Image (spheres, rainbow, N blue to C red):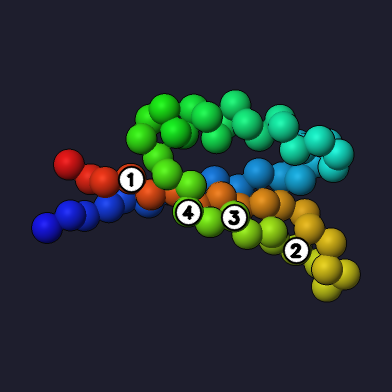
Amino acid sequence: MVSFEYKVITIDRSFLGGKDKTDVEPILNDMGRNGWELVSVVPISSSGAGTTTNIRYYFKRQRF
């Protein structure tokens, strides 16, 4: 039976500079090299204003 392990990374939107999202590419590429598959991206709002303050990335990989 195949089983998986999961990892969640939350990145503060200010890390991305609010403009160009390419700053996150090295992180995603590193995760991919280590066998992690990106399965979901969720914007997180910490205030009632609906402004995205963080972005949460969900990964999975097969457990051996």
Q: Nearer the viewer, mark 3 or mark 2?
A: 3
Residue beneath label 3, please?
A: 41
Residue type at the position of mark 3: Val
Residue type at the position of mark 1: Arg
Image x and y of residue 22, in percent: 72, 32
- Whole-angstrom CA distance, mark 3 to mark 2, is 13 Å
Going from the N terminus, do you reach mark 1 or mark 2 first?
2
Left or right of 28: which side holds 64?
left
Residue beneath label 4, please?
A: 39
CB contact under 8 Å: marks 1 and 4: no
Image x and y of residue 20, in percent: 81, 35
Residue type at the position of mark 2: Ser
Looking at the image, how many numbered discs can be counted on the residues? 4
Q: Which disc is residue 61 wearing?
A: 1
User: Compared to 51, does 63 lie above or below?
Assistant: above
Left or right of 10: which side holds 1?
left
